[in-house]
Image (spheres, grey):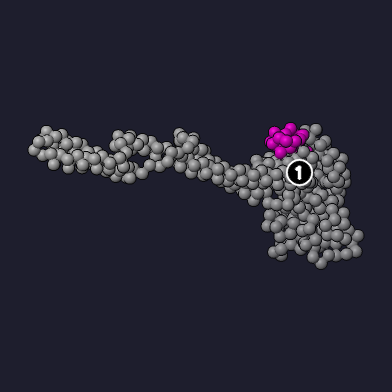
Amino acid sequence: MSNTAQQRVRALKVDNFMRLRTLDIQFDGHTMTLSGRNEQGKSTVLNSIVWALGGGAAGKKFPNPIHNGETKATVEVTLDDFVVTRTASVDRKTSTLTVTSRDGSQKYASPQKLLDALIGKLSFDPLEFSRMNDKDQLAVLLDCVDLGFDLQELEADRKSTFEERTFVNREVKSLDAQVQGIDAPDEAPALVDVGVLMQELTAAQRAYADVDSAIRDVSSWEMKLIDVQTALDRARQVSVDLLAARDDHRDPDEIQEQIAGSTEANKAGELIRQKAIFSDQLKAKTAEADELSNKIKALDKKKSDALAKAEMPIDGLGLDENGVTFQGQPLSQASSAGLTKVSVAMAISLNPNLRLAYIRDGSLLDSENMKIIQDMAEACDFMVLIEVVDESGEVGIVIEDGMVATDPEW
């Protein structure tokens, strides 16, 4: 017999477990209603199954399993292929467990190991899922769906990439503003060395001053022509020589005009240089932002592809970064019927081997939702126990003072 074969609970016998005194129930059909007044032991029916099958973890949940005043508690759970019996005694710190084949022909040497392979979310209540917040619903759904990767790690990677891209895009905007803010000409004039021009200006001014001085000398000597003819001839010769030398220099006014224009020329060249630098940086940052955007798209595609391939507990169920969705909308916005369908599908998915779920607040269900639960339980060959508060004694199996008060009504 395979340890992982699907099992349904077929019968339950309880003696002196917590609030229950004695109980013997046959689980027929696919839904069963447990009714009665509050504090009569309805919830303890499921707790007894949890205790019998759950081992050490369940033992911690129910540290005092024996009915008040008794010395021993026994719970026997009959499954499709096994009979599970757990007993607690006041003289023992731990309970004892036996698992046999249903026909009694085989007793299993490692009973808890066998049961551990069956137990999923044994105490999962579909209505409990419907009341969870978005984050908890998402965590439960991820337990049911194999995406092939850790969704939280993918979301963290996407978040860090998105934040990095946001930072890079700020730099892109800043650099773009700096590039657009520089009103530089398309082509820069040749750079002018002002120092060289100043040296040339000094030399030219000196040359022109020398010529002016020589001309004054000529005039002076001409006035004294009679007395200083020889000196005049010499001065004329000097004047001729200086005039020749002056031809090697540009007009000082022209040089000064060029110096005046050099500031604007050099400024234009510097603006072009700055714009080129910022343009290169802008190009690099834009490429970096594009690369990060492509990474985000790849992460989103990986996620969407995985979700598209994932086998969801029910058609129309999905998830996004905010939580669980149903038919493309947040689950919180689903109708009451839609929420019930999703919740029951989750309960079935979370208990793939032990086909049992339990609804503790069955009194909240209307006839439409009750019909949905019954149909889904039958379609999936699942047993759903429904606990309701009822004092009429006419609904389902009535639990009163820890015992079955009436015969089951199906």
Name which residue lies at 9% across and 36% down.
Answer: 226
Number of on-image labels: 1
Name which residue lies at 88% across and 58% down.
Answer: 102
Residue 249 is situated, as x and y percent measured from the top left of the image, at: 31, 41
Residue 220 is situated, as x and y percent measured from the top left of the image, at: 13, 35
Q: Residues within 10 Å of mark 1 (few under 14, many from 20)?
A: few
What is the quadrant of residue 315 in the picture?
Answer: top right
Q: Toward the viewer: 134 or 400?
A: 134
What is the quadrant of residue 62 in the picture?
Answer: bottom right
Is residue 309 highlighted in magenta? Answer: no
Position of the N terminus by quadrant: bottom right
From the viewer's perspective, tell me whether residue 167 is left or right of residue 156: left
Query: In the orientation shown, which residue stands out farthest toward the left?
Result: 227
Q: Which residues are magenta?
A: 325-341
The residue type indicated by label 1 comes to Ala
Name which residue lies at 31% across and 42% down.
Answer: 248
**Which residue was labeled with disc 1?**
308
Is residue 328 highlighted in magenta? Answer: yes
Query: In the orientation shown, which residue stands out farthest toward the bottom?
Result: 109
Name which residue lies at 82% across and 61% down.
Answer: 99
Mark 1 secondary-structure assignment: helix
